[in-house]
Each structure stands twice: as C-alpha cells, then as structure tokens.
Image: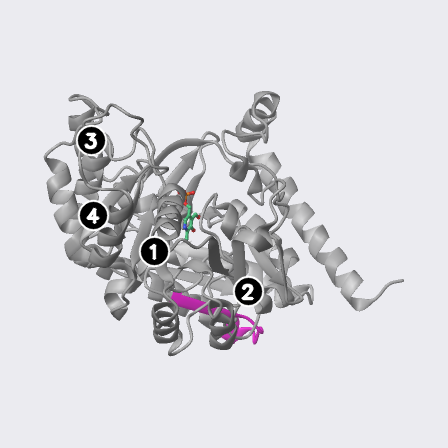
Amino acid sequence: MNSPTRRMSGTIDGLIDAEQARFAETHPRSAEAWARGREHFLYGGPSHWMRRWAGGFPVYVEEARGCHVRDIDGHDYVDFCLGDTGGMCGHAPAAVTRAAVRQLERGTTHMMPTEDSLWVGEELARRFGLPYWTLTTSATDANRGAIRIARMITGRDKVLVFSGCYHGGIDEAHVELHDGRLRMRNMIHPNGVDHSRVSKVVQFNDVAALEEALAPGDVACVVMEPLMTNFGMIPVAEGFHAAVRELSRRTGTVLVIDETHTLSCGPGGYTALNGLEPDIFVAGKAIAGGIPAGIFGVSATVAERLWQVVPFVNPRQRQSAHFGIGGTLAGNALTVATMRAVLEEVLTPANYAVMLARAARLADAARAVIAQRRLPWHVTQIGARAEIMFIPAPPRNGAEVAATRRGDLETLLHAVYMNEGILVTPFHTMFLMCPATADADVDRHTEAFARFADMVVAHGAA
Ligand SMILES: Cc1ncc(COP(=O)(O)O)c(C=O)c1O
C-alpha cells in the first residue's frame, strides 16, 4: 500500500520530524526544563494546555514585553498567541503594571469594594450597553454565572450551543454534532452526565436548526460567540444574528453572547460594533490585562427577573450567603484596579485602530503568499484577529471545519513557526494583535509563512 495520500502524509511527518529535531537542538534549556516539569505536573506544565506546542515541548519564558517573548535559551519570539487572548493588551503593559503595583501595596482582596469599581461599573455599562455587571475570576466563571441566572429566571434546564464552540470549562458546552447527533467533544469525558438532557447543539449559521431546537420552549439560554473563534475562525452569515435574536425572544430563551475572544473586534466588542442586543454579555481574558478576571452584564429585564428569585436585600438572618454564583476572589481590588487601567488606557479606540491595521497587514501579506503560489488556502481577518486555513474559503460551520481540517499541515506550520520565532495559538492558526505589534513584527510572520509555503510546494504536500 503506497497511495499518494499515504506518501504525502509520510512526507509531512518527515518534515515535522525535521523541524522538531531542529527545535530540540536549539532549545536545550527548555527541553531540560520540560523533562523536569514532567516529574511533578500531571501534564508536564502548570496547565495541561502547555503541552500542546508544536515544537514537541513548550519554550520556558524568561521575559515578555509588548508582543515579544524571550525564552530561557535566549530566543526572541513575536507573539501572536498573546496567551490565547489573555495578553491582548500586550505583555507587561505599563498602565496595568502601575495600577497593579499601586494596588498590591494597598491590599488585593477584601470582599469590600474600592472606589475604582464605581468607575469600572460605569464604563462597562457605557462600553457594552448593559446596565448591571458582576465580576468573576475567569470567563469560564462568567459563563457559568450567566447560565445559572438563565436557568433561575426561566425555570428551564437546557443550554444551546453551536457545534465547534468553546466557552471555557462549561460542561453544557463540551458537546458537538456528529452525523446529526450530540456527542462529547475531543476526549472530554461525560463524567456520568447524559449531556443530551442538559445541552442542545446545532450548527452555526443554521437558522432552521436553531428554530427547531428552540421551538419546544425548554432551552434556558443560547450561549454563543458572535463569530466563532475556537475551531478556526467561522464568520457569521448575513442575517444570522437577527434570526437568533428574533427566535430567542419569540421562545423566551435568554441570549448570552460570549465576547471573551471577539473583544478583539473593537472597544465594545462585536456587540457594540453591530448593535447586537444580548440579554447577558460575557467577557474575560484580556479585560484586566492578564490578571485573572471575567465579567458578565445583564439587561434591566434579566436583572428584574433575577431580583424576583434572589431579592436585593441584606437579610437580617446570618444564613449562608451564596446562591450558586461565586468566586471569593471575584471583583477583588487588584482585578478592579487593573481592569480600570485596561479600559481607561489600553483597550482604547486609538489602540484598536493600530491593532486592526496590523491584522489587515498580516492578512494581506499572507494572502499574497498564498496567491503567488496558487495554493488552495484562505485567510480570514475580523478586527484585530486573523486566521489561516487550508481550505479555499471560510467555513460556514463546525461541520465544514471538521470535514476539511488538515491537522498534519497545521502541525508542520506551527513547528516551522516555533523555529522561526513566531508564536500563534497552539490549537489552530489564529493571530492576534496587541497595541505594541509593529509592522516589522508582522513582516517577520510573512517571511516564516513564505518559507513554510515554499516547503509545502517543493514537497508537493498542499
Ligand atoms: C469564547 C470563550 N469563552 C470563554 C473562554 C474561557 O476562558 P477562561 O479559560 O479564561 O475561563 C474561552 C477560552 O478560550 C473562550 O474562547
């Protein structure tokens, strides 16, 4: 058996091996650190994500500033991963560092508000258009809070998500559609839960399927990104948001829009740019400049319905105070101070203009590399984010991504990047700009991508 496909995947495997060997040779200190890390961390590093880098092991960071990372072997990287968005403000942004140091000297966590929180609350309402906010320690937590509130006020148990989504460690969202049936994503264990009882999943951009799924009136909320960014970037089809809003209103379903990643579209996210009207708005990651934080905002209607269930009073009885939404460190003074610095000084309209221009430069240059070599690939750019995919046009939904994905080429490209000093999110080929990303940083990517494209053409592996 020596089919062309086999020969090709053998070729790509060989190229990956060669890139990984080069990486191991030039990163001896990181290799040694990784070997030590495996002795005491369950998956090698402090978080299991950290084993996913295509060089074969992660680089250990000495220092990161702006969009540059220096590893312990002395290599400089241009960082388009930016902590998978947590670093979208750039590494060590001066305004955030100043605010953090000032607050560290005054106490970080008191379970009492600071005056900075007043400014933050007003700014969140102004920026994102929803009146009432809660701070959490992560976007995952913000989504959990949103789902809990939706269930409390609707009395329904089901959560609807789109196939290929990721919303953090949310059980209800760990599902996908496979041959029309709901199943768990990747290697996620169902943990004894029958997910078809708590989740519904439909394909993105599929209005008819959404209408059918919401029709029985048993869905508490739809949780969605305004465009998908976690299974390759999947743009939203014309009219889809209007349909989602109309169907969710008609069926009494709460609409949760998760802008944890799409905050890269502009200062008010995709929501403000496009006049969306979520009942609950969620974000996190970059919102406090890399200090762990999430936020969710609710409409006046959702707030009033919630106060019916959990009254806004300070009870006389010293009973247990939680109602299922929490995080002792949520909204602490450090988070609030850094969130204020981000909103006031970093994620400003002027900085977004720079980030968008750099993303356009990267996308245009990558398109030129593709066109010059007549490769059947495309580049999507939306706001400060771009993605290269090995198919000719953007996918419409997760099913199209699953059917066409070239994991081998992705791994090779990422391994080339690791050797050429480029960091992108290790899960797919997505690029994010920060205010410090310069034209020269983008151009370094173009050169690395061209080397990869030439390698693929030379080996007939496209
Ligand atoms: C859209 C979206 N929502 C929520 C999350 C969860 O963020 P965190 O892991 O910071 O809680 C992610 C993480 O990738 C995300 O992409």
Tell which circle, 1 or 3, labels the residue nearer the N-terminal end.
Answer: 1
Q: Quadrant for residue 459, please give it.
A: bottom right
Q: Residues within 10 Å of mark 4 (few under 14, many from 20)?
A: many
Tell which circle, 4 or 2, labels the residue nearer the N-terminal end.
Answer: 4
* Residue to which mark 4 is pinned: 346
The N terminus appears in which quarter of the rendering?
bottom right
Where 454 sits versus 43, above or below?
below
User: Which mark identifies residue 170?
Assistant: none
* Residue to which mark 2 is pinned: 398
* Image depth: mark 2 or mark 3 in front: 3
* Residue to which mark 3 is pinned: 315
Tell which circle, 4 or 3, labels the residue nearer the N-terminal end.
Answer: 3
At numbered mark 1, what does the secondary structure look like: helix, strand or loop? loop
* Residue to which mark 1 is pinned: 259
In the rendered view, does 439 fall on the left or right side of 413? left
Q: Are the two marked residues, 4 and 3, in contact with CB atoms closer than 8 angstroms?
A: no
Q: Amino acid at mark 1?
A: Glu
